[in-house]
Amino acid sequence: MACDAIARLYDVDEDSAVFKKLQKTEKYDQGTFTFRARKGKLIDLDKLHESVWATRLSGGTRSGLVSLEVTAVGHIVSSNGATVLKVADSDAEFVIDRQADEKKADVFSQLQNVSSDKVVKLTGVIDNYTGHWPNLLQKEPPKPRRILVNSFEVVERSQ
């Protein structure tokens, strides 16, 4: 049902929505939910937040979110002393920061050397978007969102 709702509301490829449990038990265990936008579409994180808030997850539940990892394509620019990803074909942008993990911190250093005329595909975790659902959903995510970069690649515009 969640797969259908996300696919219907957020222009997600229905065939790409997959839930993978991390443990093979009968209990309510952790898992990973993965989905991908249809070609030429974007997933609006504000609408995703509103949609989850409107479900029972905004009420009394002990479940939560460990992390929200996103992949976005755009240009890296410097704005007010910060490194920013301007998402292609939209007004969306992410302030990019380094991970605490030294291996991933090096990725941030490399990213800062990418020319702003290059198209970059960046993957990272949304900062401070974690916790039990009721508490997490009651506060508005900060704007612009901050993404802790895990990896990136320079891509051709056709991707």
Image: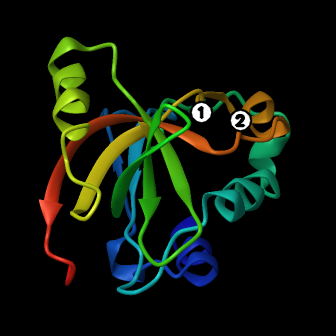
In the image, 152: left or right of 38?
Answer: left
Q: Which residue is mark 1?
A: 129
Q: In this rendering, is residue 14 above or below 110?
A: below
Residue closest to the eye, 97 or 65? 97
Q: Residue at x 24, y 59 (%)?
A: 120
Quick one: 127 or 74, which is closer to the camera? 74
Q: Picture coordinates of residue 24 (x, y %)? A: 30, 36
- Place residue 83 in its image quadrant: top left
Q: Amino acid at mark 2?
A: Trp
Q: Which SS class for mark 1?
A: loop
User: Residue 155's mark?
Assistant: none
Question: Is 127 on the left-hand or right-hand side of 73?
Answer: right
Left or right: where does residue 85 sit relative to residue 64? left
Please tell me which residue is depicted at 46% across the width and 82% down the height of the picture: 41
Residue type at mark 1: give it. Answer: Tyr
**Residue 13 x %, y %:** 40, 81
Q: State the image quarter where residue 36 is shown.
A: bottom left
Which residue is label 2 attached to?
133
